[in-house]
Amino acid sequence: MIKFANPDIIAAASKDYATKQDTESLTKVLEAVSTILKEEGEVFIPVLVEQDGSMSLETLLNEKRETFVLCCTSQFQARAAGYETTINRRLSDYIDMVMQLDAAAGICVNPGDDYPFTMQKLMLQALLAESQKAPYSNGIKLFKGDITTMDVDCIVNAANNELLGGGGVDGAIHRAAGPDLLAECKILMGCPTGQAKITNGYNLPAKFVIHTVGPVYNLNSEDPRHMQERSELGSCYRSSLEVAKLYHIHSIAFPCISCGSYGYPIEEATKIAFIEVVQWLNENPNYGMQVTFVCYDDEAMDVYKSIIDNAQHPDPDAPNFMSLLTGLGKDLPKQ
Ligand code: AR6
């Protein structure tokens, strides 16, 4: 079960602000609102249902007789304020709607609480604009070291079909995340090769882990181009990025999938990783995804660096994948 921020974090921060009344605690309330906006959290909006079935928003007036539209961070808060009938809307849609109401000066969050919090339209507009701009631009970085230490939204695990842990990077991730990760993996019922499934990150600095299953490199394959493995490995990168996007993830770190026990030659695997990632970034130019390729040792790092170097200084006789990368290369890091 993936946990998202609960809108009640706004209520907790308002309470703190009500007692302290300082800039730091005010900033925390605004950060909480911003988090809920970005995570597309929902609020409960008290409404008045007329006899003819039409609905109007519940409001209150402040001492300056300005009108504030009400919303609550939970059903409990709505009831505490005496409102039985509520509708659920994403906080961002609700603020959008309030911005269109000329008569409204702003919103009042949790009017029945001991610590209601009001926000004028100007502040709402700023928060909305901030939440709508991509937190990152698209980009690719290299990092040498242990993926479990990375402070990113999500790390990718090179797992096996059972998703029940293993050696290599899989073992390292399970050790660092703690036993809750295995417990969550058990309910996922495995994962087909080339696909990806997401869990929480538990004790890891990363909030999420995306588990993908790379192909085992078949040395005895009758296909000298290993097309099946290529396509499955490419699919690992693509599926992981798609799952990440679904969960509003904006920074993701990949290990060298299949390049350990599964035996994929690192030069080939690295080309596929770059092609898939650069293509995905170009298909999602405004999403804002920071991708880090994590190399555990110098050998892997040298291979990744040489790909970037070749893409930026293309050899006229370069193989096809290089020209593809060169054409797409605006997201590659500067050497
Ligand atoms: N951080 C970053 N990269 C690492 C780390 C780490 N802590 N540890 C190893 N690597 P592998 P596979 C690199 O074998 O080939 C597992 O048992 C490593 O140097 O972990 O996809 C699973 O359960 C290599 O470059 O994954 C599966 O059964 C890369 O991670 C099977 O192995 C991948 O090596 C999957 O094999």
Image (tube, rainbow, N blue to C red):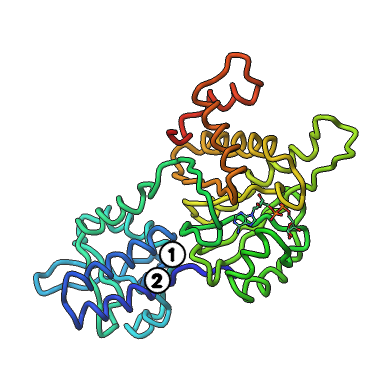
- The percent coordinates of residue 295 (x first, y second) are 58, 48
Quarter of the picture containing the C terminus is: top left
> Which residue is tagged 1?
41
- Secondary structure at badge 2 equals loop
Residue at point 74% right, 37% down? 230
Compared with 113, 300 (above or below) is above
Instruction: Choose between 124 and 134: the one closer to the eye.
Output: 134
Q: Looking at this rendering, what residue extends furthest in the front direction? A: 298
Asked whether, in this view, residue 12 is left or right of residue 263, the answer is: left
Quarter of the picture containing the N terminus is: bottom right
Dot 1 and dot 2 residues touching (CB under 8 Å): yes
- The kind of residue tagged 2 is Pro
Compared with 279, 262 (above or below) is below
Residue at point 32% right, 59% down? 95
Q: Quadrant of residue 9?
A: bottom left
Residue at point 28% right, 69% down? 28
- Residue 7 tag number: 2
Asked whether, in this view, residue 262 is left or right of residue 40, the answer is: right
Q: Earlier in the sequence, mark 1 or mark 2?
A: 2
